Structures are given as C-alpha cells and as structure tokens.
Amino acid sequence: MFTDIHSLATNLVVIEGRHPTLLWEACDVPSIVVYRTSKTLYVLDTGVGPEQRGVLEAQMTSMGKGAGEIVLVNSHGHFDHLGNNDLLQKSTISRKRHLISKEAAPDSDIRAELFEMYGRGKEYFSYIEGLPLPADKISGLLGALGARSIAPSTLEELGQQLRQSGVLPALNSFLPSIVVDILLATYPAVFPSPETMAFFEDVSAPETIEIAGTRWSGWKLGGPAPEVYVLRSGGHSKGGVVFYIPEHRFLMFADETSSVPLWPDSDPRRVMVTVKKALSMLDSGALDWLCAGHFPMVPSNDPQQVRASLLRIQGQFQQFSDAVEKECVTHAEGLTVDELYESLRKNSSPPPYITFLMANQFPVFTTFMKLTLLNHLLLYNFPSRKEPDGKVRFFVPGPK
C-alpha cells in the first residue's frame, strides 16, 4: 500500500500519492485532500486507482458521518486527478455537488487527448535521436509489452544494428502512439463522472478574492464565512486551480507547481504569479500548511520548508528559462529541438534542474524533455524557420 494518510487536523486529511520510477511499471498518482466542516464534506481531487480509491472511500465514509452535503472539486481535467470521481455517486450523503472549471473540463477521449499533446512533436523533433536507451531499462519495457527476457548485451547489439540500418526515422513516426499506449496501460480504469460535473462559471462568475493582501480570481465555497477558496491559476494546464482552507491556513497547489511547460496549454509564468502570492501569504501569517498533487506531495507546516518549496519552484523556472536562452544565444545559426536537447545533455555544468529533468525524462515519459523544450520555444515565441530538409530551427528572440 503506497497511500500514506496525513491527518493535519481532526477534520483535514491529505492522502499521499506516488511518483513512478519507470513509466511501464507504475502510474503517477497525486495527493488528494478530504476536509470536513460542520455540515459539509469537501473532497479536493480523487486521484486514481484502486489503492487510492479504497483509502479515499474509507475517509469519505468516516469523515462524512452526519454531513448534510458532499462537495467534490477537481483542480483540473487531467485523468490522474479525477479517476475516482464516481465515489461521489456512491456516497450516502444526500446532497451532492461536483464542480470544475469549464476551461479544465476533461476530454471524453483520454487517448486522443494524450496523443494530440504528445504527438505534437512529430513535426519538430525525433522521438529517438539522442535519447539514452539503457539496455536494462529497455529490457524491462519489452517485458512489460510481453516480450520474453532478452539479455542486455543482446539488446545493445540489436540497438547498434538498428542505428546502422537507418530504420530509426521510420520507427520514429510510430513512437508517440506506442508511448501513449504504454502510459495508458500503466493506469487503472478511470471514472471521471462527467455526468455529475457542474462548471463554476455556470454557477457564478469568478470574483475578486483578497487573502492577506493578495488578490485572486476565483470562487468561495461554504456561504458567508467561506470554508474553501477555489483560486484560479491556470499555469500547469488550462483552468487549473489551487485550494485554500482558511481554518487551517492550508494551501493545496494541486499541479500548479509546474515550473516548465509540460503540456501545450501550460504557462509557467502563471505558476510564478501563484507562487509569489503564496510567499506573500506566508510572510503575512496567512499560510501554515503547503501541499501539492506532486511536488511537494507531502504536506508541511515548517515555515522554512514551505518557503524552500516555493523558492525552489521559482528557481527551477529561472534555471530552465536561462539554460534554453543561453543555448540559443550561443548558437546564432539557430537550433532544432533535437540540437537544443543534445546541447543541454552534453553541457559540462548544467543547472541542477536541467540535470534532474534529463535524468527522469526517459524512465518516466520518453522524450518528455524534448516536448517540454518545444512547448517552451513556442510559448515564448522564439522565431523559427523551416529548412529545406523539413527541420524547424529556432532562434533567440530579439529585444523586447
């Protein structure tokens, strides 16, 4: 069982998630929150999978006794955060509400959505070129796909023959589909319960919310004395929100800690705005507890740890942005995404966050680093030119 339960108070629980080490051996599961007030049980995201489902259902049952209402709120539309949404319908609490931002509404076809996001790179880079392919990890991947055991030495020899044969460019076009299928195969069944979803924007327009001198846009839940604030951020993905529980001065970032553009609809600049507000809340005494869906997955109320987590997000954002721009400035002739990736990989003294991303991009999500680089270049409008050979070359932006 991986789901540790963190009881921050008698009425506030964080169910810890899990980070995978290998894409094909385990799925990524975020932390989720259950909070009870005098009349209402709040469930903030539902995670994914039977293990987290069992723990969440038990907490909903025990903490929901005597509640007149249950309110489920999804932070955004990614399926690892709404996989157990159908538990809302199974609850014995009579009055039920299920809320999500209209912008964050999940796609009905998860595979198509993932393929569109991950397959975006096909016109810009190779999913294979330059990618470290350790034989031991490839052996595990092939085993997960049903292949018999293959010795690492045999795989290394086979890989060399494939490279020499010139067949890799042809295989490249199939890789996005294969990776998406592998990713989905690691996840259990998902129950997003779209039929119970109501959009915040249809219930009421977002209002300006002030918390300890910080100004947000969002919604208040719980009546005249708000019990949960749903605050718009939209940096990790469109429509993404964070949650603030004033009773415990608890801030749940969900996935709004992404300091790089992991997805085509990511905008880390918005994450930086959210982080800056959180730091201001910490300074003013309005923030005690900090947690996130993934980083930091475990809640903390140590002021130094909370500050360090927030400053780390800012630092990672700056390291990544500076590293990309430096490479583009150094190569005045421009860089393809493949060349940019290779330059960063071969850097003799890369920033710590670049090292971290490079080390994790294969076991967790093949070529995710290249996709992130592409998203960054397009988000920040780096000038580009398509060469006669079809490759797209990017250049450093001019003065603003």
Image: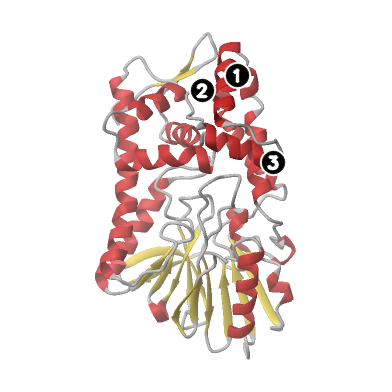
Q: Gap in Å between the C-alphas at discs 3 and 1?
A: 24 Å
Q: Gap in Å between the C-alphas at discs 1 and 2?
A: 8 Å
In the rendering, at what x and y percent does residue 336 appear? Answer: 44, 21
Numbered disc in front, either 2 or 3: 2
Quarter holding the C terminus is: top left
In the rendering, at what x and y percent does residue 142 appear? Answer: 64, 36
Label 1 with label 2: CB-CB less than 8 Å: yes
Q: Which of 232 and 161 is in front in this view?
A: 161
On residue 317, the disc is: none
Indicate the amino acid at tag 2: Glu
Indicate the amino acid at tag 3: Ala
Instruction: Name the residue carrying label 1.
Output: 168
Instruction: Judge whether residue 115 can be spotted in this image.
Output: no
Q: What element carries label 3?
A: helix
Instruction: Name the residue carrying label 2.
Output: 129
Q: Is residue 261 above or below residue 34?
A: above
Indicate the amino acid at tag 1: Leu
| First along the sequence among labels 1 and 2 | 2
On residue 112, the disc is: 3
In the figure, is residue 112 to the left or right of 2? right
